[in-house]
Image: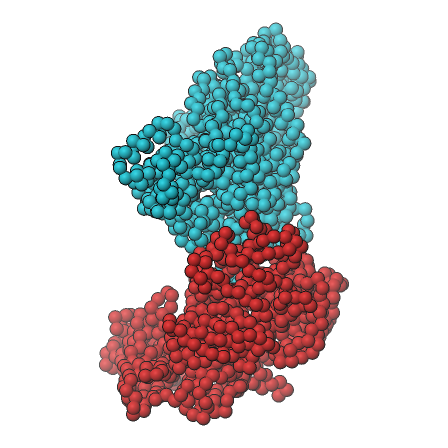
Amino acid sequence: MPLRVFLACVVLSLGCSRCYGQAFIEGVFPPVVERGATTRVELVGNELETTHSLWTSLPAKVVKAARLIKDKEGNVLADIEVSSDAPLGIYGLRLATKDGLSNVHLFAIDDLPTTNERELELEDASNNRLADAQPIELPRSIVGVCRMSDIDHFSFQADKGQLLSFEVVASRLGKGFDPVLTILDDSGRYVMDRDNDVGLFFDSRFQFRFKKAGRYTIRLHDARYQGSDHWGYMLRIGRFPIARVAIPSTLPAGNNVTLSFPQLPDSPTAVQLPKTAVGTFFFDFRRPGDDASSWLPLTVSNLPNSMESEPNDKLPQATTTTVPANVHGHLGSANDWDWYQLDLKKGQAISLRAATREMGSPADVELAIYDASEKLLKQVDDVGFEDARFEFSAPEDGPYYLVVRDVVQHGGPAYVYRIEIRELQAELQLTSEIGRMAVPQDNWQPLPISVKRQRFSGPVELALLGAPEGMTLELGNLPADKNTTVSRLHVRSSVPAGLYTIQVTASAQASPELTLTAVATTHPLVDKVPTGRGPHGEPFELREDQRRLPQSLTNRIAVLVTPPSPYNFEIATPEVALPRYLSTEFQLNVTSDDGLQQPIVFEARGGELEWDNLREPRVIATIPEVTGSQIGLIATLRSKVNTATLQQRVTVTATAQLPDRVVHLTRTLQLTIQEAFRPAGAEDKYEAVPGEVLTVRVDAHRLAPFGGEVRIAPQQHEQLPMPMSIVIPEGQSSVEIKIPVAADIKPGSYSLTMTGSARVAKFNEQAAGKLVIEIKPPAADKEAQ
Amino acid sequence: MFHRNSINHLLLLSVALLLAPQLCGADRESTQPVRLELAPLALQLQRGQSHRLLLTAFYKDGSSADWTAAASYQTSHAELITVNAAGIVQAQAAGTATVTAQANELEATVDISILETAFPVVPDFDTHIVAALSRAGCSQGACHGSPQGKGGFLLSLRGFQPPLDFKSLAREEMGRRLNPLDPENSLILLKGTSRIAHQGGKRFTHKDEDYQVLHRWIGAGHPASSHVRTLEQLELIPSVAELHRSAPQQQLLARAHFSDGSVEDVTGLAVFEMADNAAATVSDDGQVSFSNTAEAAVLVRFLDRIETVRLTYINRDEDFKFASPRAHNPIDELVFARQAQLQLKPAGLATDEIFLRRVYLDAIGAIPTPAEARAFLDSDDPDKRTRLISELLEREEYARFWALKWADVMRANREAVSLRGVHSFHRFLIRIFADDQPLDQVAARILTSRGNTIHYPEANFYRIARTPTDAAESFSQLFLGVRIQCAKCHNHPYESISQRNYYELSAHFSRVRLKGIRFGLDDEVVFLAQDGDVTMPGTEEPLTPAAFGVVTATDSQSPDRRSGLANWLTTDENQFFARSTVNRIWYHLMGQGIVEPIDDFRRSNPPSNPELLDLLASRFIEEGYRVRPVVEMILNSSTYQLSSRDTVVQGERAADASRYFVAPIVRLLTAEQILDAISTATGIPEVFEGYPLGTTAVGLAEGNVNHKFLKAFTRPIRDVACDCARDTDPTLNQVIHLLNNPSILDKIDAPDSRLGQWLTQGLADSEVIENVYLATLSRRPTRQEYRIAHKHFKAVGDRAAAMRDLQHALLNANEFLLRH
């Protein structure tokens, strides 16, 4: 699925909060909880009054809400308990209300003691001015908020020669905050500043050695002085490793491994990976004597590691590597070129994928393949928003050389990279448009799933992972010719109400020997508006910090099972055709418990029923609200001007406001918007022989309710002469015309375009269809044959 | 060339020369020259070739007079060479002869050798006819040199494309413009002499050399050039001269040195133009005439070369006695020497009050607080001015203020580099000035920048100047003070900058590429492609990177061609970087550049005081290209500290004083300075949307801030690379803002304003009046001002209202609004 379409779907699902739950979290404070402790966190937002539980992207045994309290403003106070073995890093949370699940927010788990920014707790305790800096004791994690035009100052004591590490976690929490840190001395003079460290989005992590003992102040503000009441941050100060990259960055699960951290002088370090580690996870790293840990991303992989061997700046020095492998290298200085030798057989096809940003590296690598004569065969920089990747097929047996370089010729300790090299084979990717849903017991909700097949074309089977018994996926499998499906997540009445975390997996038999599996990824958004402006003015362009959410969040779906719904509905006509500029109807069947008094209201969204930044909806849905059961409820879809003629999925959400909760049910229909007519032959194909006068019937193929006159300009063919203009009058579906087939016409199939025009509503509409005439050989020829 | 030692030597020599008139005034009175000299000093001619001689009388004081027309001439061999009364020699036969000029009992000689080869009778199209058309004005932009030509006749602008001109003149319209059988009646000559209607008027007469050259060429069958010869040097005699008081006129001699070794007198085919100067003119024939004391720069153009002659004439005022404040540093010595030479009187030294306000505004862009003003004015320290300057230059406001000046011309606006880019670039600039980073390194860092603009704000330079030509233009204007834009389409009309120079400079940036949006936001990545060239328009020849003829590519393998350019910045071949930078600094402190406009360095726009410019450049280089020492030196000079209150009347025979820094230039404060000054005076900071409270207008990162007051006072939106975006003329809108802007009135009326606090503290009227004056005008009131204020208090009755009236009035006073 193209990225923008996917993003639009994502934004749609976010904007359509009523579809899956009304609660919306604006901010979380503090956005960090302490490992091995209970931290009270305030969650501010809308529609949180009926909150009853907290979902996180970590297992409940690691992080759980010991208590949830609703305050007077309708916000939620959660006492979040974090086990002492919880992994550090950034994770996602949602609130579950009686109505559904909230949007996701990010929070951090840290091992430093925290102190809140004083001005949040006390009035008249502003720390906006240097003179009003809030004193802090080290080591410390300061938790604060950056409001519009806000500047925060914190003062601390440093000894002569003391080496302190600093880290700000702000941008990584998924907001638009771009923090800048400045250290000032006791007279307010500038000492140093830090803006961004690539790999940490717009955050930074660094260390600084103080030349003089004294009182220092650290100043923090947004790079543009923007802010929000919900832009929380965590400022960590103390002694902790500043490493944000490791070599290697992929590891076999559960083993003792030795990692080197190029940013640290005392690297390498032997570490024990958590046995539970899967996929990409945060590895927390702490040296003896450190006050706290740092976390950095590592990936569990079954590919063998291949390490760069310096010097390999030239072809003769190339490091030999195998296929497949994860190649780990380091651009240690500016303009460093790393050469690797790959011995390939003729026709051997491999795929290469660079990874830098996802592992916290600032390198912006370009990959190139040379042959043994140093002839450049292929060169690739970024692919879309991702690092370089490409496929290569060896033209001959022999050595080939992979060259990795930084495209801007920078280098340094953090400039590590990983190149995943694999034999080219079939691949399967799976995407879920939504990352949360609320399903009443004994009911179902739609779950749109997309697959991307590469180098195979077979069917894909979907399955649920982690789902309780009674929670099933129906209509889940995708035949070979389909890439998308709206599955149904069905919850039986036996499934207890509560929170669940599920994963959707897919499997496909790419070949008799190769079975592919994949886990569906989601892309939940933190903010309502993902970004101010995309590069080309797109409203839905994602910020980097929201594009790269923690994998613990993006490969799972939060499901809230609620008590049974007192009503249900189905769309009786799940496929609807809408003539452009006109209206059409579709039918809903609503059933409800006898006791249901509240009205059921409907809302249809999706496709051209949506507002976008450029224009208002071009299709308007009107669905009357109902009270009680109603079979055959008629809904209307009306097309306005400039509607696109294409298929689009429309979600219809029914909402009933019960005394104690709101129940939403969502169903989908496939809407096809097309022209109100499409002139063509009444039959698919007419047959004639040369010299014959063929009688054909040209049909307007009108789509109700259109019944107006259609004027047709047939495509002219010398040997199949037709009138220049054909008129199908109002109220008449077709007209008959005669075509004197030329005697010398060659046998074969002739497809002639019938371009029609008509006044539809108040618009001039045009549409074209085909008249197909099959010219048979003359009878004599037939006999001859 | 600005090698450190050579500059020092040059300076010493210059100072000695300039001071010479003061030291030997008696000799100056001499009317008798000490020697005569014929120029050129040696001459080689071809048979049939003629050439002008210039006879110059030199006086003991170093001045000179043009005696060409006053002398008598003899030749040693009349059969070889003849000479007329005007000093024009004509070679008759091969051999060697001597021409002697005699005047006033002095004589001078020149040896002339005549070659056997005859001077071609038929003029050469590329070098003679093109020059003749240019001199006649036919090929100027307003006539046939316009892109569309005129009347169907198209010539290349100033003859920069001779093949095109030949085609137009000799081939188009079936050759009707030329009549080789009757050259006199060729259309080009009929129109040029206005014998038939010509919209361009009369361009020459039968006697003019351009007419005669054209006539001869047409009569010879108007051939195309038979061989390629290029102009290698345009020699001007004299190139620099100080004219004796008895001789306000000087004939100029232009000699062309061609690539085939020939040298010709092209005075009759060259174009002479005078830079704007009320006291001097130049005739079409190269005769310069002074009507009063002045320095004059004469622009001489022949083919694609442009050279400048600098002449000085002193209309001696016997009563003039130069008096200046004590010279505090070498700046003063050079400025005062120049003033003395030109019979100009400088103002006296400014009072402490004036100095205090001025130095605050010029160094940090703000006025002093009442406490700061009081401390300075009450100090008895004889070195308090120097101390104050040092203190101000260490303040963070200094960095912010000077970053603003650079930000104004770097074009970093929200549209070009996004709001994030504007802020990060602003922080980058502030650190440069706060740390006093060497500007050569900063320039090199910007020039060779690569990477994501989020992490490398200097790379925003390439987001703003996105194409090689745009980058070359920006580089040249910002770092060299040279405008090269004209040369994009044709050779520079006022400077020896060719179209080739333009594209060779652009070639440094030919491999710079941008890739957008690596972070899904507003960033771009600047990187270098492995290849890519800039080609010469027309020929499509790939060009080797060069800076005004100096090849800079040191490593042909390196994709980064810019590093050679960065290295060139500080080499001896670079005549611009240091000088344009110090000129910019001088302009910001003095209100006028030594070269003006400050980004228009060219030979035809010479500095008003070249020695001063060299001194500052030398200082800048010695101090490792750091700005602060130069600023400090200027601020400490008496020249900077002259009084704006003195009324200095210059003598009738004095030069035009406007370029020689005889008194401070009084000018309206900038939008930011006025707004910040109001905030300082009232004690109430201005609130800027999107910025923390306490941010000053000078400290705003963005140019296009939505603030009515700043817009009214024309804060630049930073979309042009010159310091020309600020209107200096006051407008009614500005007056209304100062009188009625609710924000300003609210500041005055605010209970927690300075005034409100003084009233709350119960200070006496006189104390409050003094404080208001110190806060607003940085000085204490005079007795009369006290009296007027007291009188107003009595009349109003409401003490607080009267005090607010007083401050409101002072905020609208010229003394507050002007830098003086």
On the image, which quarter does residue A517 sit in?
Answer: bottom right
- Decide if residue A172 is in sight here: yes
State whether residue B741 is above or below residue B589.
Answer: below
Residue at 27% of width from left, 34% of height from top? B794
Report how many numbered discs are placed on residues in the image: 0
Closer to the camera in the image, B705 or A618: B705
* In the rendered image, the vertical position of residue B459 relative to residue A381, given as above or below: above
Location of the C terminus of chain B (image quadrant) = top left
Residue B525 at x, y = what percent?
55, 58
Q: How is the image coloured?
A: by chain
Instruction: Name the foreground residue: B255 vs A520.
Output: A520
Q: Give coordinates of residue A577: x percent, y percent.
A: 34, 81
Q: Is residue B415 left or right of residue A709?
A: right
Residue at the image point whose x is 56% and y is 10% from the top = B29
Instruction: Name the image quarter holding the N terminus of chain B.
Output: top right
Q: Is residue A286 left or right of residue A149?
A: right
Residue lying at the far right in this picture: please name it.
A316
Q: Position of residue A148 (x, y in %)?
A: 43, 58
Question: Residue B13's x, y, as percent?
Answer: 64, 24
Question: Is B234 situated above or below A12?
Answer: above
Instruction: Tell me the residue at 58%/75% (across/down).
Output: A36
For this view, does A286 lie left or right of residue B388?
right
Who's the residue at 27% across and 73% down the image? A760
Residue B536 visible at all: no
The red-tinted chain is: A
- Chain shown cyan: that is B
Q: Nearer the viewer, residue A153 or A248?
A: A153
